[in-house]
Image (cartoon, rainbow, N blue to C red):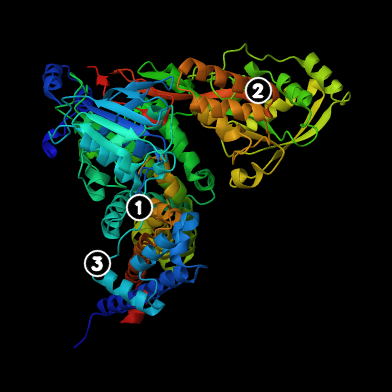
């Protein structure tokens, strides 16, 4: 029986992803276990008394050997039990769910704008290569990328929210009474994130488009008298997308864990903030859980990017078959 | 009590909707809604909250914790804006001859959120749990004179505290201790504690914002609280706080930056409030190290400061002048002598008398570890220059300033949070104080403080604290130049809220929302 090569590929990649996730879980566990001193001492710091240290060691099962503790943690995780936060004194999982939920909403919407915007701009730049549009845009996106997100964010808040009063400054989406309210609150963070993300993808798209446009088959299509837009969009673009997709995947991973600053400016606590806070409080189970979920998202995003790249690229597709 | 109490539609959205449709036809509908729609007050702390959050007043650590506790619980007594003790759940109190036994009469007809009556048993429970050996409250440290076994119910509405040692200002000491309904578990108190306060918890998950509180229908103060619901969150980013007020996303902030408020000042929908606090900024010198070991040098340093100018440069004018006493003049027992003014000629003369006719060269440590510390050093350096006090500023890293520079270098910029007269004087200035940042050891001063602590008569006690302050002012090693204000703001339609100089004591029971 012949299995669809794409399907086989996805299965292989997913298996590999699980292997890497397993490796990541080992690394996360080991790096926390390898830190100097015992976890209980690190958590309690200077407030440690003999009694409280003992109690905490018991709670964390620190007397067990490390492999046993790792096994216990991993089997818990597999069953959906990420343990109990030491600081919150509540299960870790509900926190990860709600913080990740917010992150996915904002990140998803930001990507929804990011993908067509940056590819479109890259396409435009390639089509108008070396003209004023291209140069102007290159400068604009590079400035957008170079200015730190919090500067962009605060500037947008002052200008669009406080001075012009067009949009709400903070993303307090629990106050929203409709989906439109919530979307309005998310516009400024989405714009801020796009400022930071656009440049790289635009430049990737532009340069690979320029390469593709030079190739023989594109010239052939032009000679056959196909319209310029058809040549650009149907013939050239799909072949030029692979580098852009990888750049977008990098951005998508960043959106999940790396946007703490934007979360603070717009008061929208996401997974990045949860991780930073739990490190500050040395909340080991929470750090482990959050780091694992972040890694899983990274791996997942890259898996999607790989598969998309393969699907789009006829050369790779045929080689598989 | 879940979704029914949430306003289905707020006045703001409705107005926005009406405006968007360009129709005024909707407006009558709006007023019909306003009559029935529950009024929600949205308040926000400036300090970050997180999964550590708790409602339990015994274990709260940050400002949002204090705000939660103030919504839900009340103490036997409370502190007013001048740090004077006022009745709350206790109506009055008395003590024996030496201040070792205190009797509080409790307010009758006070109901907890679950409808049960407030009695002496609840007071005993609330104080005893602070000393739980398994998990003592951090407040147990300063409440050490309380003997948990020495608290007894004389009757249902009278409680007697027999202390381990006399404390003449015992009511001050317990002003931050809240009363909870007896018999609650720690778990319950953490997220759904039952108190007597104007609001009861509707929804609070540590680490999730906002937390929501609803009106306590049987609150003992008639007609209060003035709103139906309170939403509490935190907005750690300063610029976001200002933007949220202007946009009307938050109704009350009690913690705004002192500078950069122009936009708020210009907005007629926002009302800024300031309150004097006892938070002081100054410069501390070791009085056992040359040249500061000569009292004339210390006086010259104090005379070189132009405090009016410092106030503008360091706090943007939002504060009051310090008179080299750590007790702010409006705080109970605050120093009542004329303000020390800049006098360059006199400073020069004193320096010459002390053997420095050509002036002195000093190295002053500061850091960005607190707002205004660097500005204070820079401005003071410029002011002292004409008197022959040549200062080189050493800006140390902010992260470990209080562990590596403070108490370790002879000449530093310092700051202390506001306290009652006794604490403000004793913690930095007693000879054997752990935090004696000026190395000042003065027997007379020590005696005044210790005697004041034994003196029940308020007038006499006040005189002793005055004498102690005069000694610090004229002989001590601290140039206490400024007291910073607290700044908060409300939306203009929010009435009845008063910014308390101490964040721990914010109260929201009197707040109403107009329109």
Residue denoted by label 2: B471
The secondary structure type at the circle numbered 1 is loop
Query: Could you tell me residue B53's position as x and y percent?
Result: 34, 45
Marks 3/2: CA–CA distance: 66 Å
Mark number for residue B133?
Answer: 1
The residue at the point 34 percent across, 44 percent down is B130
Residue nearest the observer in this picture, B329 or A142: B329
Query: Could you tell me residue B116's position as x and y percent?
Result: 13, 34
Quarter residue A62 falls in: bottom left
In the picture, the quarter occupied by the C terminus of chain B is: top left
The chain containing the residue under callout 1 comes to: B
The residue at the point 26 percent across, 66 percent down is A81
Marks 1/2: CA–CA distance: 41 Å
* Residue projecting furthest to the front: B97
Left or right relative to B305: residue A157? left
* Residue projecting furthest to the top: B338
Residue B371 in sight in this render: no
The chain containing the residue under callout 2 comes to: B
The secondary structure type at the circle numbered 2 is helix
């Amino acid at each position: 029986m012949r299995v669809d090569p794409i399907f086989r590929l996805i299965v292989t990649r997913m298996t590999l992803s699980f292997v890497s996730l397993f490796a990541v879980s080992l690394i996360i566990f080991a790096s926390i276990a390898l830190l100097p001193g015992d976890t209980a001492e690190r958590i309690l710091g200077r407030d440690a008394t003999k009694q409280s240290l003992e109690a905490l060691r018991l709670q964390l099962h620190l007397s067990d050997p490390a492999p046993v503790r790792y096994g216990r943690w991993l089997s818990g995780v597999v069953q959906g039990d990420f343990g109990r936060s030491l600081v919150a004194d509540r299960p870790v999982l509900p926190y990860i769910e709600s913080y990740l939920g917010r992150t996915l909403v904002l990140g998803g919407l930001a990507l929804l704008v990011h993908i067509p915007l940056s590819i479109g701009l890259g396409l435009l730049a390639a089509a108008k290569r070396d003209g004023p549009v291209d140069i102007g845009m290159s400068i604009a996106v590079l400035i957008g990328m170079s200015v730190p997100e919090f500067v962009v964010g605060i500037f947008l808040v002052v200008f669009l929210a406080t001075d012009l009063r067009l949009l709400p400054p903070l993303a307090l989406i629990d106050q929203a009474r409709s989906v439109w309210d919530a979307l309005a609150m998310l516009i400024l963070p989405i714009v801020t994130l796009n400022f930071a993300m656009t440049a790289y993808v635009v430049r990737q798209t532009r340069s690979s488009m320029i390469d593709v446009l030079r190739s023989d088959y594109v010239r052939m299509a032009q000679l056959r008298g196909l319209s310029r837009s058809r040549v650009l969009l149907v013939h050239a673009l799909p072949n030029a997308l692979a580098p852009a997709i990888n750049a977008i995947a990098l951005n998508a991973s960043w959106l999940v864990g790396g946007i703490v600053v934007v979360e603070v400016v717009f008061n929208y606590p996401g997974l990045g903030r949860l991780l930073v806070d739990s490190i500050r409080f040395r909340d080991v189970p929470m750090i482990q859980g959050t780091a694992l979920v972040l890694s899983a998202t990274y791996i997942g995003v890259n898996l999607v990017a790989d598969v998309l790249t393969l699907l789009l690229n006829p050369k790779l597709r045929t080689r598989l078959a | 009590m879940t979704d029914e109490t949430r306003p289905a539609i707020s006045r703001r959205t409705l107005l926005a909707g009406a405006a968007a449709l360009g129709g005024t036809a909707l407006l009558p509908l709006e007023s019909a809604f306003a009559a029935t729609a529950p009024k929600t007050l949205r308040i926000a702390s400036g300090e970050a909250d997180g999964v550590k959050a708790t409602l339990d007043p015994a274990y709260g650590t940050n400002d949002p914790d204090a705000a939660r506790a103030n919504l839900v619980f009340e103490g036997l007594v409370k502190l007013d804006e001048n740090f004077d003790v006022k009745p709350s759940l206790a109506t009055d109190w008395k003590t024996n001859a030496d201040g070792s036994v205190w009797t509080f009469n409790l307010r009758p007809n006070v109901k907890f959120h679950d409808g049960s009556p407030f009695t002496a048993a609840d007071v005993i429970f609330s104080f005893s749990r602070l000393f739980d050996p398994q998990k003592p409250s951090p407040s147990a440290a300063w409440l050490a004179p309380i003997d948990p076994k020495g608290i007894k119910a004389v009757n249902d509405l009278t409680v007697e505290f027999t202390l381990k040692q006399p404390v003449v200002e015992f009511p001050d000491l317990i002003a931050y201790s809240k009363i909870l309904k007896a018999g609650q578990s720690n778990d319950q108190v953490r997220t759904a504690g039952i108190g007597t306060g104007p609001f009861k918890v509707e929804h609070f998950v540590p680490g999730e914002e906002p937390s929501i509180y609803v009106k306590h229908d049987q609150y003992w103060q008639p007609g209060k609280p003035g709103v139906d619901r309170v939403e509490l969150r935190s907005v750690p980013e300063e610029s976001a706080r200002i933007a949220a007020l202007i946009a009307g996303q938050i109704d009350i902030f009690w913690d705004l930056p002192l500078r950069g408020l122009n936009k708020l000042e210009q907005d007629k929908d926002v009302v800024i409030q300031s309150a004097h606090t006892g938070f002081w900024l100054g410069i501390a010198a070791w009085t056992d190290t040359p040249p500061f070991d000569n009292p004339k040098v210390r006086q010259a340093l104090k005379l070189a400061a132009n405090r009016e100018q410092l106030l503008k440069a360091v706090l943007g004018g939002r504060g009051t002048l310090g008179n080299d006493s750590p007790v702010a003049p409006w705080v109970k027992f605050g120093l009542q002598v004329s303000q020390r003014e800049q006098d360059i000629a006199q400073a020069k003369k004193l320096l010459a008398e002390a053997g420095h006719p050509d002036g002195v060269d000093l190295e002053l440590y500061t850091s960005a570890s607190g707002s205004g510390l660097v500005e204070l050093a820079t401005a003071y350096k410029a002011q002292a220059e004409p008197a022959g006090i040549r200062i080189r500023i050493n800006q140390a890293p902010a992260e470990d300033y209080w562990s590596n520079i403070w108490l370790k270098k002879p000449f530093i910029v310092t700051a202390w949070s506001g306290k009652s007269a006794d604490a403000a004087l004793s913690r930095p200035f007693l000879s054997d104080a752990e935090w004696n940042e000026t190395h000042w050891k003065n027997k007379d001063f020590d005696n005044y403080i210790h005697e004041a602590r034994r003196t029940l008569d308020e007038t006499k006690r006040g005189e002793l604290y005055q004498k102690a302050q005069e000694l610090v002012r004229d002989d001590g090693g601290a140039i206490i130049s400024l007291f910073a204000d607290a700044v908060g703001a409300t939306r203009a339609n929010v009435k009845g809220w008063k910014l308390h100089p101490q964040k721990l004591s914010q109260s929201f029971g009197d707040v109403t929302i107009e329109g």
